[in-house]
Image (cartoon, coloured by chain):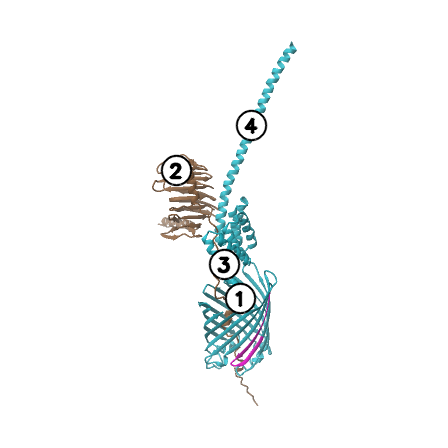
Chain colours: A brown, B cyan
Amino acid sequence: MMKKVSAYLILAFLSVPLTALASERAGDVVAVRGDAFVERQNFSIKAKKRFELLEEDNVRTEEQARIKMLFRDDSILTLGPKSRLIIKQYLYSPQEKRAESIYELVDGRLRSVVGNAVYKVTTPTAFSAARGTTYLIWYDVLKEVTGIAVFDGEVEAGNIDPSIKETVVVRKGEVVYILKNMPPSIPSPIDTKIKDIEVETIVEDMPDLRFPVWRPLIPPHPEWAEAVKPPIEQRPEINTRIYIYLNFP
Amino acid sequence: MEIGIISQNRPSVDASRCYKLLKTVNNRLKILVELFFISVILLLLFNYSSAEDNEKVVEISLTKGTFLIDSERYEEAIEVINKGLELRPSDNRLLLTLGIAYSRSGRYTEALEFIKKVLTLDPENCRARYELGLVFLGLHNSPEAEKNFKEVLERCPDEHIKDAVTKYLELLLVSRTESEKTAHLSLLAGIQYDTNVILEPSEPIIKRPKKSDQRSVSVIDAGFEVLKTERLRLRAGYMFYQSLHRSLTDFNIHQHSANLKLDANINESVKALISYTIQYSLVGGDLYSVINTISPGIEFQTKGDLTTCLFYRHDFRKFFDSDTFQSNSLRSGGINAIGISERFMLWENGGITAEYSIETEDTERDYLDSLGHRVSIMFWRGLKDWSFYLKGEYLYKRYKGIEPGFSEKLKEGKQEYSLGIEKKIAKGISLSLSEVYILNDANIGIYDYTRNITGLYVVLRF
């Protein structure tokens, strides 16, 4: 019994930092085009600029929508239209300013500019691991195929099924396809169609515009506070005091 | 023969040597050429890859910089964007974002430099033109701001930017109309309920039959500009106040107040001010006081939206005795006050005003002479049809002499809290509600009192 209690205590003790880590900010939404949502603990919240993202958040975009996210390690992730991404794991070390992150692309497309992170993206058919890379990954639910196109750096890719051991290193300017239960295809050059898709996914953002606060038709001024007060400050009347003088013979 | 042989053989030996030598030189040259080409290719590759790296750094700089600006973390944004600019010194997007970061942080001179650079490279850049207008607004250069905003309106296809610019142009028009106004007139009429008209002590020796009352209040406030040059502005004002009590008619106040105010701009951020006011008051139909006030000051517009004013005030006060105030004339004398006020604008039409002053009061009796400290803070905000204020003030006074009949010098602290709210109901007409609570706390019980004034008014502005 004691052993069981101790085991629970140890488990509870160990789970404290993990829970704390789980609720930490992973990144922020920096731009939204169209309708995008963040699903968190059975709630769906419409994503807006500066919305904080946490581990386990599920980010979803509607048709013709895009969402750009900036993570703490400086990675920039842009989710294309009709896509869904889960932040599976995000561990950030503020001392090293470095992260270990795993994302799951359930559907649609994702453009990544990888910052200072050990960065992994999985799809239902594939995994990709990158460091300091710019690449596009997409998953077609109907065809059950993942495409990975690299624009800068290198990406290691393979089938999500651990029994398929073959992996491939996709270099700059190359694309691979990974079908369900199949090893990755031989890398081939990126065609213009893929380049166009990448350009379409990019969201260029600028700081918010500044709108003026409307000048009121009623100009408030400090004197206004005085106008409603009686302009004379009479002291309590000292002459109402009663003095009684007693004279003794 | 031998010679011949030798001579025959010698050339053949030399040719072979020459051939070998030539072959070696040729090979070495080949290696050198190959090495040269390899280095050129490597150099190109290296440059290409660093160009790719630069692209990534620039993208991160822009995205992060923009995010930091929107989060109002301007110094961090400037640092991040500068990292990108080290790699791409003439990247227009980076230059514009840096200009915006400087502009939002109130560093308008630096912002002007970078935004102008963007417009030199791309004169049709709408966003840069709009930002330039904002920078000129920040630099209080309304004509230049208006010029740039109008240019955006004419050329820019972006509806969102056009919308913002239209609002700024409307704002500029309103402020220009206001500043061009040379005269103003406002009327206030309303009713008040005062819980302590006569300032009766909280624990009076003899309780009066009535101390609270209702009254009507009328205020006329008028002013006009006598003189306006580039540096000087002279304004004249007049205020009339009349209160009519329902029962305590002996406390009806009738007051006329006239003033002259002169502002002189010393430079862009320093202004000298001087004002003179004469106030003539009657209470219950009897002459109560005549007060002349002169107040010079100097105002500094510091960085951003903070204005500091150092002021001095002298009141020449003459009080008159009446049936109600039989020893009023003893209070005649003067008040000298010196103070500082800070006004911090949190919005275009709202902010916080804080003030501190130290004042000495000289009268005809030492027990009425005092040294006081006054501190106040006021928060106010104006919206399209609404405006409101909240004010708190504390005045602590220490009297210099002992009043006959008492054993100690009087010390009193007066707390005053007020709030007001005004709602525009039609053009030039608004309704206003106000509440003032006063608590006077003294070491001599007879001077303790509380007072509450609630009022409802109609305000007309012309």
Helix, strand or loop at disc 1? Answer: loop
Q: Which chain hosts label 4? A: B
Residue pictured at 48% horizontal, 48% vertical: B63
Q: Which chain hosts label 2? A: A
Residue pictured at 50% horizontal, 68% vertical: B392
Question: Badge 4: few (under 14), some or many (20 or more) residues near its Cα, within 10 Å?
Answer: few
Q: Which mark is residue B181?
A: 1
| Stretch in magenta | B272-291
Residue B2, horizontal then vertical, whole percent: 65, 10
Q: Nearer the viewer, mark 3 or mark 2?
A: 3
Residue occupying the far bottom of the picture:
A249
Q: Nearer the viewer, residue A65 or B60?
A: A65
Disc 1 residue type (three-letter): Lys
Q: Which residue is mark 3?
A: B169
Q: How far separated are the C-alphas under marks 4 and 3?
A: 71 Å
Q: Nearer the viewer, residue B359 or B168?
A: B168
Question: Is residue B273 in the magenta section?
Answer: yes
Question: Badge 3: few (under 14), some or many (20 or more) residues near its Cα, within 10 Å?
Answer: some
Residue A162, horizontal then vertical, whole percent: 37, 38
Q: Main secondary structure of the magenta part?
A: strand
Q: Which residue is mark 4?
A: B31
Q: Which mark is residue A177?
A: 2
Q: Are the two marked residues, 4 and 3, in contact with CB atoms closer than 8 angstroms?
A: no
Disc 4 residue type (three-letter): Ile
Q: Are the two marked residues, 2 and 4, in contact with CB atoms closer than 8 angstroms?
A: no
Q: How far separated are the C-alphas under marks 1 and 2?
A: 72 Å
Establish whether labels 1 and 2 are both on one chain. no
Q: How far separated are the C-alphas under marks 3 and 1?
A: 18 Å
Helix, strand or loop at disc 4? Answer: helix
Helix, strand or loop at disc 3? Answer: helix
Q: How far separated are the C-alphas under marks 3 and 2?
A: 55 Å
Helix, strand or loop at disc 2? Answer: strand
